[in-house]
Image (cartoon, rainbow, N blue to C red):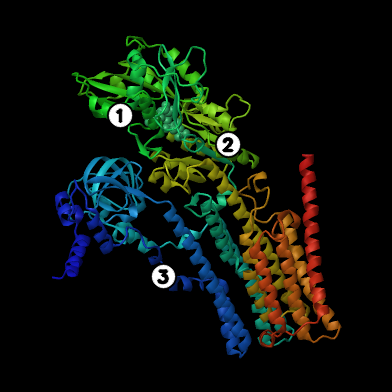
Amino acid sequence: MTSTAREATSLAEVDEADHHALASHEVILLLETDVDRGLDTAEAERRVGRYGPNELDAAATAGPIRRLLRQFNHPLIYVLLVAGVVTLVLGEYIDSGVIFGVVVVNSIVGFIQEAKAEAALDALRSMVRTDSRVRRDGSKQTLPSVDLVPGDVVFVEAGDKVPADLRLVEVSELQVDESAMTGESVPVQKDEVALDPTTPVADRRNMVYSGTLVTAGTGVGVIVATGARTELGEIHRLVGTADRLATPLTKKLTWFSKVLTAAILGLALVTFLIGLARGESGVDMFTAAVALAVGSIPEGLPAVVTITLAIGVNRMARRQAVIRRMPAVETLGSTTVVCSDKTGTLTENQMTVRVIWTADTRYEVTGSGYQPEGIIRVLPEGVGSADGEGGPDRGGVDLDEEGALHWTLTVGVACNDARLNREGETWTVVGDPTEAALLVAGAKANIDRKELSRALPRRGGIPFSSDRKYMVTVHEDGQEQRRVAVKGAVERVVELCRQELLADGSTRPVDPDRVHEAAEELAAEGLRVLATATGHIDPDVAPDVENMRGQLVFTGLQAMLDPPRQAAIDAVGACQLAGIDVKMITGDHATTATAIAEQLGILGERDDGDVLTGPDLAELNPEEFPGAVERASVFARVSPEQKLRLVEGLQSRGHVVAMTGDGVNDAPALQQADIGVAMGRGGTEVAKEASDMVLTDDDFATIEAAIEEGRGVWDNLKKYIVWTVPTNMGEGLVILSAIVLGLALPILPVQILWINMTTALALGLMLSFEPKEHGIMRRPPRDPSEPLFSGTLVARIFMVAGLLVGGAWWIFEWEQGNGAPIEEARTAAVNMFIAIKIAYLLSCRSLTQPMREIGFFSNHWLLFGIAVQVAGQMAITYLPFMNTVFGTAPLSLGAWGLIVLGGAVAQAVVTTDKTVRRRLAERAAAST
Ligand code: ATP
């Protein structure tokens, strides 16, 4: 057998095997791997060649031909196709050619735009890269999930998204949310026991599937399928992604254009019948009715809306906000409240221990950042917290003489999962920055993590969680009992203690009030305070609160600085100016949170009820809850479960809520929020899955930037709609008025088709590129229930439609009155129409501001579009070939003068309308 043939056989074997029915060692054998060593790199590379990268091929979902055909699936296109065929049969070859031309151009443009928007979304997905922990070459490594191959040994834990289909070989309380696959949202308990071959996919407890989410526990598995071969890949192929670009607005607009199409078709039919009754030719009336229909229907609308949203998504991505669900682009613009985590989003997450407090001494720690350079010295009584930089280092304390300090630092280093890495001069952190700060503090007193783990080998414990707010490790220290090291929130640790340690190594009964007082004092300076304690428990006893309560010795407090991000301070101010309320939600102590909130400008003058804690929230009754959460700005010691209630409370008061989160337990709140915001760096995959937007830099300022972009997108959509509706209306009305009044058509059906097609592309589309207006963040959030068209805009729509129809008729009659042939009069009417459309386009660049405020040259695309349109007009007016096709004729200079004048008048009328209405609005605002 050749090697290729062998590979093909084993590929089929791997694919078709019932992995769930095999014992785990059989699966390992089949996949030619080793749980303890993993694959080696060379073999993994070979397998990438054989199986391809571990990703779903987005293009496979709907082929280009199907996507192109989809463009024809639109009521308007049916109308056009029917009209094209009928005119062809009637021998009106030019009209028929133009109509088919319109259909083809429209479909190609729609196809290209859709493909671009899809590609933009796909590109975004790769910005949020997921990594997996894998064993390769005998060591545990973190690799991009896309590089995984069958046979890789993968580790999963709570918060992870499963990167491929795995046969589990080891589990510890592993629970997986398989709703992505089965729709069932109750997590499934997993194990590694072999199953009957007939077990259906949903019941295969020894398998975890790509795309599902780990909600609890840990597990190790061998990859049996990657990419499109996974179960998710199968589902992906079946379902496709047709609806990815839909948003509430696009859905509303689709409905709107359907209703409009039906109404216009009815009107076209009536027009046709009126014409016939007047004795006009059936063929002429038919083409006129078609032109009326085509002219009136804003068929560019769906495409422009999609492209505008896609441009918005790209602009947001450039500012580090990755949109996961399209509707978020729209919702962002109407956000009224942003609820943000404190640590890492509003603050730097660069922790440095500044003060250590023990029962009888207060110490200052010098140095900043993660370099273990600095000393610890006694802080004289009455001196505030250290600034870390001040004063010459006069030599540190001697740990042998400072028993309580020694144990405070020791517990901080022992009860710790973080690592510090040195790369040249810089120190980086692997793990939790809070824990890294404790390692650094220990290192400043020469307590080395490695030596400590030899002296006190770790034998288990309880990991930190935001719910528990403490962490425990259990160590051997040569005694019969085991030593426990505990660190965590002050109130949680102190309740475990009976004694407190002093500098000379002696102990005395702990005074919880004094400890809390000291912690409050440190927290009031914005420092994050952690308490530490130690003691002994029996080896066979679980190190939980029940077994340790009142048993331990309190060693001290470590207070660390985590400064607010400068950009966040500015962004909070910007949000407040924009009428958006910023609320801080944190697991941290209320006093620390309050101090940081004051530095950020979230809290101004303090009032009762501005700061609520988790226990406060728990006490509120359901009636007062929404009002209280609306009033408060800082929520401290809040558990992830309470975040969900907070979102619901705010929503019940009519707010549009953006909420940040990073942990597994934050997922329900993220899902409930109007905009769930996950952290790209520090967040779990579960949180990202539940979110609408991911911040790739975890920075609060990015949320503000995204809101600003969201407002810009909405503005541009509105501008396009306000531009296109009256101009389409004008096109229909010109024809309708001629037929109803029994007059010659001032613009021919083919000419209407020309106007409609060229202006939608060259003019309207360019509004999507309009930059954001100045002062966009100085107005209140948009009311999501506000209708798209206000009374002012409806009035403007009718006014512009009137200007277009009036202008076209006026120049048509004027030309004829001056003896011009009807072809020339019609050409003048067509150009007048375009001139007014261009003038109105310029005016639509801002719905309220005059041109001088927005700057004539600030949208290059728009100027380019106008240039193209003008060139097109020259061609249709002067090129003999175009004259034949479109029934046009060259114009005199005088006619052009009138056309330019017409445009100028229209511009002046709309500008006056804008100015008057703005002044009225300002006066009304001033009087209230
Ligand atoms: P945010 O919710 O804004 O991110 P946070 O990071 O302060 O705030 P949590 O991580 O839930 O919130 O921490 C809550 C409390 O738990 C902290 O105030 C601290 O006392 C304690 N704590 C934080 N990290 C650890 C840790 N690694 N080990 C032990 N206790 C910790």
Instruction: Give the amino acid type for the residue marked by disc 1 in the picture.
Output: Arg
Q: Is residue 199 left or right of residue 369?
A: left
36 on left or right of 660: left
Lower position in the chain sequence, tag 3 or tag 1: 3
- Residue density around tag 1, few if under 14, some if 14–19, many if 20 or more, within 10 Å: some
Q: Is disc 1 placed on a helix, strand or loop? A: helix
Image height of 848 relative to 374, above or below: below
Residue on which the image places disc 2: 569
Dot 2 and dot 3 residues touching (CB under 8 Å): no
Q: For the residues marked 2 and 1, what is the alpha-carbon distance in whole angstroms?
A: 36 Å
Quadrant of the drawing holding the N terminus: bottom left
Q: Are marks 2 and 1 in contact (CB under 8 Å)?
A: no
- Between residue 628 and residue 872, name the one nearer to us: 872
379 vs 922, nearest the viewer: 379
Foreground: 337 or 731?
Answer: 337
Q: Where is mark 1, residue-wise?
A: 449
Residue at 70 percent across and 68 percent down: it is 727
- Residue at which label 3 appears: 63
Spatial CA span between label 2 and label 3: 48 Å
Percent position of residue 824, x then y: 77, 84
Q: Position of residue 206 (x, y in %)?
A: 22, 48
Q: Quadrant of ligand 1?
A: top left
Q: Residue at x 28, y 20 (%)?
A: 547
Image quadrant in which you'd find residue 897 = bottom right
**Where is the C terminus found, in terms of image quarters?**
top right
Instruction: Say few, some or many: other residues with alpha carbon within 10 Å of mark 3 (under 14 / 14 to 19 / 20 or more).
Output: few
Query: Residue 816 sits in which quadrant?
Result: bottom right
Residue type at tag 2: Ile
